[in-house]
Amino acid sequence: MQNIPKNTDRAENIDLSEVAPTPPSALSELAAFWPFIRPYRGRVVLAAAILISVSFILLSLGRGLAWLVDKGLNSGDAAMLDRAVMVAVGLALLVGLGSYLRILLINQVAEQVMADIRKSIYAHILYLPTSWFEAARTGDILSRLNADTAVVQTTLATTLSMAVRNVILLFGGLVLVVLASARMSLVVAIVVPIVVIPLIVLARRMRASSRIAQERLGVLSAEAEEGISAIRTVHAFAQEAQMQNRFDSALKGALDAALSRVRLRAVLSGFVFFMMISGVTLILWVGGRDLLAGKISAGDLSAFVFYAFIVASSTGTLSELGGELQRAAGAADRITQLLAQRLRRADPASPRQLTDNQGRGDKTSVEIRFRAVHFAYQSRLETPAISDVNFSAKSGRKLAIVGPSGAGKSTLFHLLLGFYEPQSGQIFLNDVPLSDMRLDDIRKHIAIVPQDPVLFSASLAENIAFSRPDASREEIIIAAKQAEADSFISELSLGYDTLVGEKGVRLSGGQRQRIAIARAILRNPDILLLDEATSALDSVSEAAIQNALSRLMQGRTSLVIAHRLSTIMDADQILLMDKGQIIATGTHESLIESSPLYQQLAAQQFKVSSS
């Protein structure tokens, strides 16, 4: 948890360890959100007090009805009838006002709690280890963040308060039924268990069905997200029909699961209402015979029927709400499972900082060392991505990494950035192991220009400033000029305020790479990582960018992944990798003379270039 920055916001001060990973029942799963509700408990208590008061007012109406029938209507006292109506109107006003206040308070709390939960879920996701995202699907994550929390919100805002009210009415009505007529209460005692026992059995099946329905909805969301985010690829290969079929298949699965849940709710609801109406009818029959025999008064019969109806309707309503609770429990379980995912590695108790061993003013000279590093991705542990890797990147020097695809080049960057931890061996910045440093401290020394730059749905200026949000507009423009991006930005009608679209879709590949380079320049890093940083540029633009990068790399430790050997011929050292191992090191000239694989790569590329 120490990786998540703290501030004064309620949601970010909540300890997610308090959220139970998989509680055993529906109510306990919802109770797992108590840490989020706790800051608003004052309003929750007030709403509960109002709810209880309104419930007791409703229960009092039955005895008032009995008194009115026996003392008012039978005696023919019109004034008493008038007073009774006025009292009833006053009670109705109290019930209406109480319902207004309860709904207002509960819904305000539900909205604020859901905002806090979403904030904490998103903060938790941001600090999950990179390896977790290998298997996670973006659409399913978004489904938990939006759809599942919406289900829980409905439960917190409506279902729970209605359930509490109906529980009070149910048990209060049962007590008053017994007080009204012990003989007729036997009928209720027979009917209630017949309703409750199937309710418990069906509720268990409903919970499992609801969980499956929510998961299928997550799969559906994932399919939609993947299709939309890759729409250009879909169009390019004319595979709209294939994507439609995949979506239809996921939709069918979600629909089947939802219909299964609906059938269970329908069976439960139909059975409960049949028993409710049958029970009230049976009570009227028994009570009517007692009234005809003179064993009870008309007022007692009226009160008994009133309370019997409350008991029956409360039971029916609870059966309906039970389905909603089970659906919310399925959604809550998916949320708590996400929150229970372990965060990235904890920061060391006494983190170490880099010290400048050469003195570069406001910057730190950094030497990178890999010592016997071995690493395999979780999805393919049997095949190491890199094995027994040893090398040093001298401070202020340019080190290039070349080799066939899948040789492990990008993995070196991933390990250096702390995305993953090696299974064995160590990585050092100067003399400090990465494991002794905070991840944020490691990354503040590094800037990366990836092969496929990621831009956000924001302006060009905001995308450049992503590496340094506090940068001034002047600094942003200077960085863009150094990255040869200012010329095309200035031609746009809104200039640096132009929105780039989702993932930079409104820019060309070369323009996106120039923005990524400007972002790295603005970062002013100690370590520069370039992963095919000019692959999307034409030859004229590449020459200009290479000059800009050369200026940027001066005095910095630079690691450059390159497939085109022409871009790294001036490197101070070149690592040649194959099958996860470094098989040769040297300059371009020395490798041309000594390494058959490097000779082969050079021959292929320069032959293609010359042709």
Image (spheres, grey):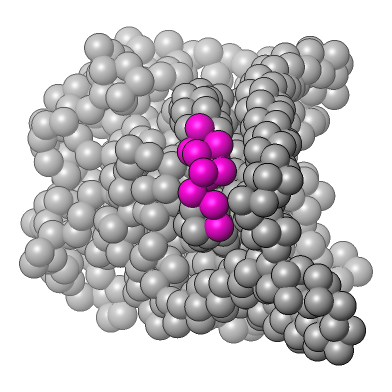
Residue in the foreground of this view, choosing between 521 and 551: 521
- Count the labels in the image: 0
Q: Residue at x 56, y 43 (%)?
A: 184
Is there any visible trace of residue 530 in the rendered image?
Answer: no
Residue in the foreground of this view, choosing between 371 and 107: 107
Which secondary structure type mostly characterizes the magenta part of the structure? helix
Residue that extends furthest to the front in the rendered view of this protein: 293
- Tell me where the magenta segment starts and ends, as one range: 180-190
Residue 402 horizontal/vertical position (percent): 39, 28
Q: Residue at x 55, y 20 (%)?
A: 606
Is the C terminus in the top left, top right, bottom left or bottom right quadrant? top right
Q: Residue at x 73, y 46 (%)?
A: 292
Up the image or down, 83 lies above or below 167; here it is below
Horizontal side, residue 360 vs residue 101: left or right: left
Does the magenta-highlighted stretch encompass residue 185?
yes
Is the N terminus in the top left, top right, bottom left or bottom right quadrant? bottom left
Horizontal side, residue 276 vs residue 422: left or right: right
Is there any visible trace of residue 177 in the rendered image?
Answer: yes
Residue 156 horizontal/vertical position (percent): 56, 59
